[in-house]
Image: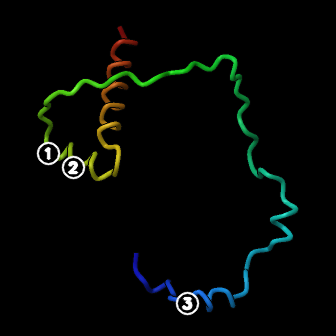
Amino acid sequence: MSGKHMTRMSLDEMRKTKSRTDWDRVTSAPDHEGDQEIDVDWAKAELVEPSPKKLISLRIDEDIVEFFRSQGKGYQTRMNAVLRAYKDAVEKKG
């Protein structure tokens, strides 16, 4: 992100700036604007507890590992989710 759209201000300068927020609109608006939320029947919800993980040694192509790592924290969990989706699809197909 370049700094050309950023301005440094002291705390005192920030306190002196005028808010551009339309507080009348904010306070009069309903809690939710937009599409209606989806109704969920929580009585049918199923608790899915994470299963224990098994520590293994696995050789994976470097570009694959770097791709997942570049997505940020939790990359191993995402890799596991991709493998699970593949497993579930194969099992469903029969």
Looking at this view, is 93 or 39 the one in front? 39
Q: Which circle, 1 or 3, is nearer the viewer?
A: 3
Residue 62's mark? Answer: 1
Residue drawn at x 86%, y 70% is 24
* Residue 85 picture location, percent across and down: 37, 26
Circle 2 residues within 10 Å: few <14, some 14–19, many ≥20: few
Quarter-of-image position of residue 83:
top left
Give SS at disc 3.
loop
Marks 1 and 2 in Cβ contact (< 8 Å) = yes
Quarter-of-image position of residue 42:
top right
Choose the circle earlier in sequence order: 3 or 2.
3
Quarter-of-image position of residue 3:
bottom left
- Identify which amino acid the numbered label 1 is placed on: Glu
Give SS at disc 1.
helix
The residue to which callout 3 is attached is: 10
- Identify which amino acid the numbered label 2 is placed on: Glu
* Residue 84 picture location, percent across and down: 35, 25
- Identify which amino acid the numbered label 3 is placed on: Ser
Q: Quadrant of the C terminus?
A: top left
Question: Rounded to the nearest whole Å, what is the CA distance between mark 3 and mark 2?
Answer: 40 Å
Residue drawn at x 49%, y 84% is 6
Residue 66's mark? Answer: 2
